[in-house]
Image (cartoon, helix red, strand yellow):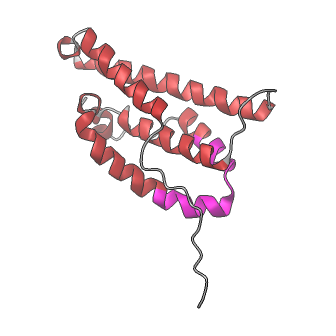
């Protein structure tokens, strides 16, 4: 009788609670001001602005890790994987359909820089193991949530 070994691999299926709250608040604000009456260009610019703010927050978080501020929460590998998953999810959700059709949906250099920094914090072997699962779960999540957050995605 051999002993079976189960790897301790965290597979993320949901964005973090903070991302859910952020997207819900974004939808609430859009509906509060009558988002259906706003020009599409205005809504698209708002999404771009939100993504810029998200990337700025992730940059500050990664700067905090580099300076090792006292009292700062340590970035464990599991937390970094969740942050990476969240950032990739937001970059898909906060991209408008028009950008995708025109081929401009590539992440900007700031997003790529933050993604590269987060990936550098993960063990390279683990990263090779996690990324395919992360990407397939991300694709499933986008499909599942496209209905519930359709207002953002259909832009």
Rendered position, 69 above or below 89: above
Return the residue nearer the eye: 104 or 36.
Answer: 36
Q: Residue drawn 61% across and 44% down?
A: 80
Return the residue nearer the eye: 92 or 83.
Answer: 83
Q: Residue furthest left?
A: 37
Q: Find residue 117 and report its horizontal and vertical position in percent.
A: 66, 42
Q: Find residue 8 and report its horizontal and vertical position in percent.
A: 59, 62
Q: Residue furthest top?
A: 33
Please check the rendered image and state whether residue 92 is part of the magenta-colored stretch, yes or no. Answer: no
Q: Find residue 56 and report its horizontal and vertical position in percent.
A: 58, 24
- Using the rendered view, name the quadrant where residue 3 is placed: bottom right
Decide whether the magenta segment is chiefly helix, strand or loop.
helix
The C terminus: image quadrant:
top left
Q: Residue furthest bottom?
A: 1
- Using the rendered view, name the quadrant where residue 7 is placed: bottom right
Q: Is residue 42 visible?
A: no
Q: Residue drawn 44% across and 40% down?
A: 15
Q: Find residue 62 and report its horizontal and vertical position in percent.
A: 67, 33
């Amino acid at each position: 009788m051999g002993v079976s070994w189960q790897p301790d691999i965290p597979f993320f299926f949901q964005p973090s609670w903070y991302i859910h709250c952020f997207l819900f608040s974004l939808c609430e604000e859009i509906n509060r001001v009558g988002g259906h009456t706003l020009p599409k260009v205005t809504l698209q610019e708002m999404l771009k602005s939100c993504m810029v703010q998200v990337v700025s927050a992730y940059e500050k978080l990664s700067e905090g890790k580099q300076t090792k501020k006292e009292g700062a929460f340590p970035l464990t590998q599991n937390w970094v994987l969740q942050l990476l998953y969240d950032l990739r999810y937001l970059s898909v959700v906060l991209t408008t359909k028009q950008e995708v059709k025109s081929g401009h949906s590539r992440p900007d250099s700031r997003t790529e820089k933050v993604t590269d920094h987060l990936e550098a914090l993960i063990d390279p072997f683990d990263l090779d193991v996690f990324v395919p699962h992360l990407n397939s779960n991300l694709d499933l999540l986008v499909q599942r949530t496209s209905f519930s957050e359709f207002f953002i995605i259909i832009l």
